Image (spheres, rainbow, N blue to C red):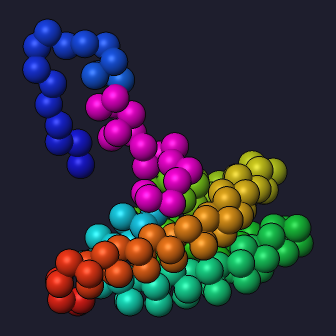
Amino acid sequence: GFNDCLIKPIVLADLQRVVAKWCMPFVVDNSDYYADKLLEKVEHNRELGRIFLQKLFAETPDQLASLERALQNQQIRPAWEIAHKLHGTFCFYGFADFRTLAKRLEQLLWEADLASAMRQFKKLAAKFSDLQNMQTSLLQRLNTEMERATDLGFRQK
């Protein structure tokens, strides 16, 4: 996915900017990244994006709660199954930072490393909590972009 260029002589600040831009999905904490990924997924159909976003926020907390219970009860197979579904969910949405966390959690459960899996779960749950805190700004971004496109006379998909 890396596709950029710098013109010689390379200035350190420019190099840092380009590297940060392409590494962003792994350290992202802003709603623009998630909104952009969601819009890519739905081919800029903002209404569908809102539906998918609402589905994510409706279903994921229950999955995380079930996963936490399974981990606390040392139920490795059920925990792995939930982690596997979460990994698939985040792959679907294209959220690389979540995908990485969920994949690692899935691997730790496959290896039956419950202590490490619980630590990884806590990272994933905290990250999702941060995303939930961005829910309003994500929806606003979808609405704002839709209103702007309508104002400019573009047909909504």
Per the image, is 28 magenta? yes
The answer to whether residue 79 of the structure is visible from this angle is yes
Q: Residue furthest front?
A: 151
Q: Is residue 41 left or right of residue 24?
A: left
Q: Residue at 39% across / 39% down in the picture?
A: 23
Q: Which residues are magenta?
A: 17-33
Q: With respect to residue 45, does 29 lie above or below?
A: above
Residue 16 appears in which quarter of the rendering?
Answer: top left
- In the rendering, at what x and y percent does residue 94 appear? 39, 65
Q: Is residue 156 left or right of residue 147?
A: left
Per the image, is 120 magenta? no
Q: Residue at 24% across / 89% down in the picture?
A: 156
- In the rendering, at what x and y percent does residue 75 appear? 80, 73
Q: Residue at 71% across / 78% down in the picture?
A: 61
The answer to whether residue 109 of the structure is visible from this angle is no
- Give the overall secondary structure of the magenta segment: helix
Toward the viewer: 154 or 126?
Answer: 154
- In the rendering, at what x and y percent does residue 120 appear? 70, 52
Q: Residue furthest top?
A: 9
Q: Residue at 23% across / 89% down in the picture?
A: 157
Toward the viewer: 119 or 52?
Answer: 52
